[in-house]
Structures are given as C-alpha cells and as structure tokens.
Amino acid sequence: MSPAAEILCIGTELLLGTITNTNARWLAEQLASLGIPHLRQQVVGDNRERLIAAVREAAGRCRVLITTGGLGPTPDDLTTEAIAAAFGSSLEERPEAWAAIEARLAARGRSVSASLRRQALLPAGAELLPNPTGTAPGMIWTPKPGFTVLTFPGVPSEMRAMWQATAEPWLRAAGLAGGVFASRLLRFWGLPESDLAERVADLLEGLNPTVAPYAGAGEVKLRLTARADSPTAAQALLEPLEADIRSRLGDLCFGTGDDSLASVVLELLRQRDETVAVAESCTGGGIGAALAAVPGASDGFQGGVIAYANAVKQGVLGVSETSLAVHGAVSDPVALAMAAGVRRLTGASWGVAVTGIAGPDGGTAAKPVGLVHIALAGPDGSRSEGVRFSASRGRAWIQTLTVGEALNRLRLRLLAAA
Amino acid sequence: MSPAAEILCIGTELLLGTITNTNARWLAEQLASLGIPHLRQQVVGDNRERLIAAVREAAGRCRVLITTGGLGPTPDDLTTEAIAAAFGSSLEERPEAWAAIEARLAARGRSVSASLRRQALLPAGAELLPNPTGTAPGMIWTPKPGFTVLTFPGVPSEMRAMWQATAEPWLRAAGLAGGVFASRLLRFWGLPESDLAERVADLLEGLNPTVAPYAGAGEVKLRLTARADSPTAAQALLEPLEADIRSRLGDLCFGTGDDSLASVVLELLRQRDETVAVAESCTGGGIGAALAAVPGASDGFQGGVIAYANAVKQGVLGVSETSLAVHGAVSDPVALAMAAGVRRLTGASWGVAVTGIAGPDGGTAAKPVGLVHIALAGPDGSRSEGVRFSASRGRAWIQTLTVGEALNRLRLRLLAAA
C-alpha cells in the first residue's frame, strides 16, 4: 500500500462536459502543498455500479481517497451509499448530522424536507466531516486498515471550506503530510520548448528538485519543485538550481511566478522613470490591452494609437503617403514612422509600433501572412526589424505572438540601456 | 466490451494542480455531441508504469480511449512508448511523420534537433493522426479487436484542430457515433445565466432536442442538441426550438456558432457601409483588439486612440481640461468628448469610447472600482451611460465586461438605426 492519494470526482455533468473540473485542480494543489504524492485522478458519473468499482480499485492502490460530488439530497446523489456498499457496510442515521442540517435550514428560514434526511446517513464507524457553509456533510472513513476515504460535496466553495477546516488538519495529524514542497515558475520568451528542454536536458532528469518544461502561446516555462523538511530547506534546494538555469539562458528568462512580459516592461520603465506608448496596426490594440491588464499600469503606460487603417497611420501618426506607397504598410520605414509618431504625439519616452499581416487574407509572395515589422523609438534612437511567424496557427496566434515579441524587444532594449 | 469511450489525460502538471484540465471538458463535450457514451476520465502523471497500467485497465473496459499529453520531444513525454508497451508492441519510425516534422520546422526557419525524432515513432500498425498546427503527431491504433486508442498532444489548440480534422470523421466512419447529432449554439449578452435559465426553464427539461445553458465571461450561451436518423431530421428538430428561444429573448441573442460581439458589429457595419473607431481608457486597446481579431476587420474597423493617460485624452482626442477637472476622467462628458474626438480624428461613422476604473486601486465612494462610462457617437448623435460592474472578480474581468458591453451597445444602436 503506497502512502499516496487519489482524487475521484463524481458527476455526470463532468462526463458530459457541462462543467470544467476545477475541484480536481484545487485539490491537487492542496495535496502538493502538503507533500502528499498524488498519482491518479478519476471522474465517474452518477452511476452506482461504476462508482463502487472505482472506489474498490482506488482502495487497492492508494492510502487516501478524496471524493467530490454526489452528497446532495437528490436520487442521483449516490456517493455515500456506494462507498459503503463497496466495503459491504450499511448506512445509519447520525443524529448530530441531522441536527446540523435542521439548524442550517432554520437559520435560512426554510423548512425541512424528507429528502434532506438522506444527507444524515453515514456508514458505521465513519467520522462526520462537517460542512460549515452547506447542508451536505462529508465523512472521513477508514473501511479497512491503511485506506481512508474523505468525501466532499461538488460545490467548490463548500468543498474548500471543509478541506481547510477539517480535512487538512486531519491529514497532518494522521502523519500523512510528507515534508514541504516549494515550487518556482521561470518564464522565457524567444525560444521554442524543445530548445529550452535541450539546454536544461540534464536538469530534467533530477528527482529533487525536479524541473519540468511547459509550452504556452509563444512563451515557454520551467516549473522547479523541491521537497524538504522545512520551507527554508525546500527554498534552499531551489536557489542554486534557479541560478544555474538563469546562467544558461540569460535574458531569455523574462520573469518568474505571475510575471508577464507587460508587467516586467512596466517595472523596468518604473525603475527608469520612463513611459511607453504604442502604435498598433495588425494587433489592433492588443499590446495596449496587455499593458493595461497590469494593475498600476498608469505609472508607465500612456496609451497610443490603433492605426489599423492606413488613413489613421497617415492622419494621426504622420506616416508619409510616399512611405506607404513606396515601401508598403508592412515595412520598416512605416513601422519606424509609426513609432516616432506616437512618441511625438504622446510625449512618451518609448514608442512601440507593429505593422504586419495577420491573415488569413492579405498575404503576397513578397509579404506573406505572418510577416510583422516591429519598431522601437526611444531616447537613444530608433530601430525596426521584421519577423516572420508561422501562418499555420492562424490569425489569433500571429496577433498573440506579435504582442509578446514587441514587448520582449522593448524589454531587451531597456535591459541593454540600463 | 461496451461501445463507450474513456478519456485519459497524461501530465504531472495536472496532478500537481499547476493547470486545469480543460482538455477533458472539451473532449467530453465532443463525445456527447457525437452521442458516444463517456463513462470515465482519468489523469495520470508522466510515469511509464502507471501510464501502462491505466491504458491496460481502460482497454478492459471501453471501446475507444482518447489520450491527451505526453507526445512532445522531451524525455518525460512517454505516451506513445507506454501505450505500445501496454500491448507488447515496439515502435518504428514513420518516414511520413518525420517528413512532416521537418517540413514544419523548415517553414518556421528552424533546424531539426535530434530530440524531435522521437515524435516520428509509432507502434507497428498504428495510423498517423496528423497535427496540422504543431510538430507532435498523434495516432489511431487498434492494438486488439474492439479497442482503439486515439492520442493527442496536450496543447489545447493542437488537440482541437486534430480532433476536428481527423478524429471526429474517423469516429463517425467507424460507426461509433450514435445516430446523427445536430447542435447549435446561441449566444447572449446582457443577462445572467440564472435569468436565461429561468426564461427557458421548460425547455431545459427536454430530452430531444436538449437545451443546456453555459456561462462565459459576461456572455451566456445555450447549446441546442438534437438527435435523429439524418442530418435533415436533426436540423428540423432544432429549427422550431431556436425560433421559440429567439422569440422569448429578442435581441439579447446576439449570434450563433462562432459569432462574437465584434464579428456581429462588423457585419452590421458592412451592411450599412459604415466604419467604427475606438477611444479606450480603462480597456487599453481591448475593444480594438477584439475587433481586429475578426478576419477581414479592415472593412469596418479604422483604429482609434488608446487614451490611457489623461494627457492623451486631452492632447490627442481633444477632451477639455475643464471637463476632466469638473467631471473627472470617468464621466459621461469625458466619454462623449472621447467618442466625438476619435470620430473626428479618423473620419469613422461611429466612435465608441470607454473610461472607467478597473481597479484594484483608484476607486472612491462616489466612483468605485467597476464603474465605467461608455459613449457612442454616430451619424444620428451621441449618447453616454455609466454601468457598474462587480469589483469582486478583479481587473481582468471588469476589462473583459467593458469590451463586451461597449460592443453590445453599438450592436443595439446599429439594430435600432436599421
């Protein structure tokens, strides 16, 4: 018998795809923070036989089973009954559980219905897991040596309150919490996941701390996780690892944790007491929206111009008709004129401009879908360069990568100028 | 052997609670729409032995196993290898798979790395499941009579594209889809999910067609699904139902299928040969980005001004210093001046302006976090009105609702003016 935990979520609505299983993720995070290995999650519907089978299988594999769902008063709430049946046990009414349900309904001014009485039934020997915010209690039951099941309702707020008030202290007291986990997320821009994985290939083999790569939209990440006896010891395992990775990847690593390219750029601007404005064509305001998503953005973000139509590039940003005619809207000269124009217009320290072909139409052999020119104008001069994103992932992907690439170029320029 | 399907999601990040399992829900919805019973979901980590055990168990229970994750180039991507091992099969390199990977990398101007070669390995007899948007292909493999496994990468966009292009047609052709399903999604803006559910409460009880409500970010949806012997018969069940719902909800229903508020607004503008420009403060470019997300947006979307700082509201949009001082930046007079300013500046038929307090800071008793003023200036005059969104869900939520509300007001105005 392993000391590991499993999660079993019960509900036909999960199998129909009606709701996302956010409970499983929340519980997984809790188990990780307690250092309890979590090796498997399952979902079954409101079906007595399959529920009994899933509980029996889990009982053969794990030390602790956490269930969610199926504790309510309706006929398709079968969890307690099925778990009892899985171990040949019968249910008995718990007066203290029934009293708690009556008290809660009275407090809400509601009358007691017979169907609620089912919620006071538990197998003999099970401990009540009180529900401070709802009527359906759970249970903590050890039907056989070395196997305990904890049941929770499917309502996320009730499940979380019950976990924190009763289940977590119980797991700690039972000696099941194994050490302490510390975790750190490092964020990168400018290389594909496979390249990142190759550059830290030796570290991906480690068992403690572990390093795991993840791909995002343009961005790639490494999750570092260490296990130790104390938070301090766990952090001490992470620090040299993070330093090693940073020394290998340099400024490809743009941040940690909840950082975004936009939040890092705004922080660099804050340190320099500078500001930025944007001039966006193919992204239509996406760079500005990314900056505005950061709380306190107003310290460094001035705003800008969405120059989607060429008339706006000319009329508002002052791009010359000649430049548009000779070089085309998607070109370095136009990007440079846009960046300079928005900087002049807003008085920002930095102007960031993008102009490109997001597709699906509008591409040519010389200027294909995915081609974007990005210009930066700043206190130390202007620069523009083209980049070609793959057209195969579509318009939204090209727009997302353009937003990230523009912010990353500004980040690198601010770092270089520091 | 039951004709049912199971879903097996592979990834230690799911067991650590690092990410939510949105793939499982999406796949569950697809199976439901195909009429394929889906009786169990599982999650295991990147662990060869446990993966083999989970695959063998599923093979003893279901007809079709759908897996996600573990197809990448890194050493912890074990899915293909483990599935082959579960049935005592070995892997062989598929030249056509390797050629597709090389071609994709060449198109991106990247060189081939040895680690990617693993992605071209499949068990003997497995059919390649092409990945049109990434390098990791999947497979469709029947390792024993009456059991087929379909593998997908964990990246949601790749998985979805592969499902739609190859897996769904394969499941239909294999006769695994139960009858013919027709489905329609109706999209609503301007009422909470609970109100929508109440107004169609009687229809939610129906068994064929079924009606199911979903909440989104501000938007709410109804999924209508009918099952019949032919596509025509299934559509015929949906039509009177849709008409009934539309007659109850009127113009709260803004679209169907892949429509967005932005795409509907652009279509209404196209019909009138009109254009729009935006003047955005608290959304920082989000309305523009939503419009630019629609292919062909350039027909109706001119661009606009991101007036995040008051200096830009004054200097670029011509909002008067008096107006800002007397009424404050978050007010109807300022919103109206912004809308008029961007309309004048760009020559667009319509100007849409938003100014508000997205928080978490900056709120006062008189102007709390969540207060937004939205103005429309058009051929038939100008109007502005405040709206107060709940602050409890945070900055990103307020920004998202503001974008939707602004586009919806323009939609209603265009409908009224028609």
Image: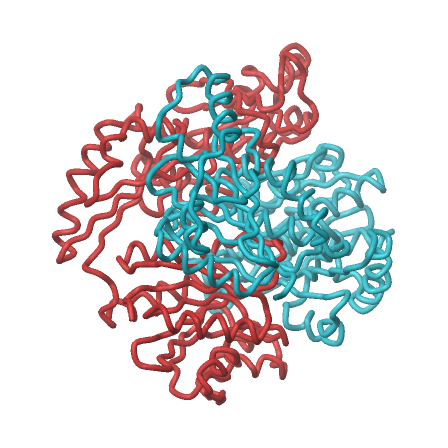
Chain colours: A cyan, B red
Where in the figure is residue B242, as x and y percent of width and height? Answer: 21, 38
Where in the figure is residue A106, as x and y percent of width and height? Answer: 47, 17
Residue nearest the observer in this picture, A391 or A150: A150
Q: Residue at x 57, y 75 (%)?
A: B48
Q: Residue at x 71, y 37 (%)?
A: A301
Q: Residue B160 is drawn in which quadrant?
A: bottom left
Where in the figure is residue B20, as x and y percent of width and height? Answer: 54, 52
Res. A124 visible in picture: yes
- Residue B80 lies, with reference to residue B176, above or below; the image says below
Residue nearest the observer in this picture, A75 or A352: A75
Residue nearest the observer in this picture, B109 or A212: A212
- Residue A368 lies, with reference to residue B287, above or below; the image says below
Q: Viewed as shown, does residue A416 lie left or right of A131?
A: right
Residue nearest the observer in this picture, A291 or A308: A291
- Residue A373 lies, with reference to residue A314, above or below; the image says below
Res. A217 visible in picture: no
Q: Residue furthest top?
A: B326
- Residue B176 lies, with reference to residue B310, above or below; the image says below
